[in-house]
Image (cartoon, rainbow, N blue to C red):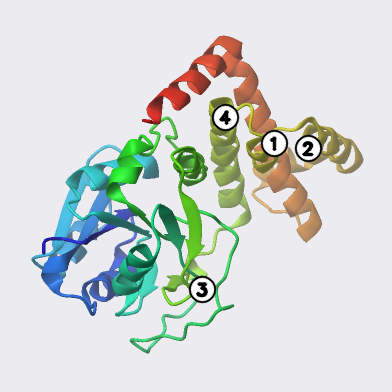
Amino acid sequence: MGVEASLIVPTRNRADVLRLSIPRFLDQTIPQDSYEVIIVDDASDDDTQAVVAENAAPNLIFRRYETHRAAAFARNRAIEAASGRLLVFVDDDALVRPDYVEEHLASHREYDDVVVGGPIINCTTPPTERYAPAGRLLGRHSNPFPTGNASVPRDTILRAGGFDEDFSAYGWEDTEMYRRLLMVGLKRRHNWRAPIYHYKPAAHRRGFFERIELEKKRGAMAAIYYAKHPDDMTVAFETKQLGIFRMLDRAANRMFGLDRRLQAALDSGKEPDSALIKLLLVNHVEIAVGRRIWEEMGEAKRNAMAEATAARVKA
């Protein structure tokens, strides 16, 4: 029968959670030779390689790269190594049930030309049950292509051009991939019986300054995303590139002195006390960096990006 499904698992410096997730990836109800787990290590400097070796199995494939290149690169390398007709995208901190792969396969047997998403249930302690609870409303979300829990036929991903490696930092590479999946005619389906428990222990919660750095990357990638799909108003809204967002941000900056507050926080190493101010600063950084990168690219480069994106999709 061959390999039916390939789990695509990018990772970087997450050895501690891989100790929990890999055994669950390998504990599935379908035969071991009918699926594979492909872990791509994006230049980790912890003991990721040792953890993978501890869980060695015939259907566990490991690739390590020495230069950090971000999620789009890692997922493409995993896709290249995959032999399954179905790609199941899942994060390294996803704790799955034994019927996880079986449920994704069942959805694609029921529906043609679909991207299937499943529930994402956030947790700070790992569930103790092999069959952790699932329910129609439990972990439901609006993300059309959550690469923490989604599946797509491999040939469709290739027809849509794979992940765009221009996304060289955090943010938007999965959403942009979904835009191209729509271009080749895929529809969305949700399978509530295929949840993942998204394990985020308290020690892994991002602090304010880490979030600021993350939003700088997200804002820069947002400008690239919009440049690739400039005529899509949904993308303009998602990335906060619409003029109304910039206008509101300028007003908030004048009213609350966001630039001054951010610089003071960075200089002192003390985050603001107000949750509202922190929220405004996070959005301010994302919008400001996005607009700066958009302008720095220039019209010619933006047009070239849009043309290249259209050319990626194979009719």
Tag 4: amino acid: His
Percent across and percent down for residue 314 are 36, 30
At x 55% / y 58%, what residue is drawn? 206
Provide the residue designation for mark 3: 121
Q: Which image quadrant: the N terminus?
A: bottom left
Tag of residue 287: 1
- Secondary structure of residue under mark 2: helix
Of residue 16 and residue 4, the one placed in the foreground of this image is 4
Residue at the (34%, 43%) spot, across then down: 157
Q: Which residue position holds label 2? A: 245
Tell me whether the residue at label 3 lies in contact with that at label 4, contact meaning CB atoms closer than 8 angstroms: no
On screen, residue 222 versus residue 109, left or right, reads: right
Determine whether 125 is above or below 129 in the image. Answer: above
- Asked whether disc 4 touches disc 1, contact meaning CB atoms under 8 Å apart, the reply is no
Mark 1–mark 2 Cα distance, whole angstroms, equals 8 Å
Is disc 2 surrounded by few (<14), some (14 to 19) or many (20+) residues within 10 Å? some
Upstream in sequence: badge 4 or badge 1: 4
Q: Earlier in the sequence, mark 1 or mark 3?
A: 3
Q: Is residue 253 visible?
A: yes
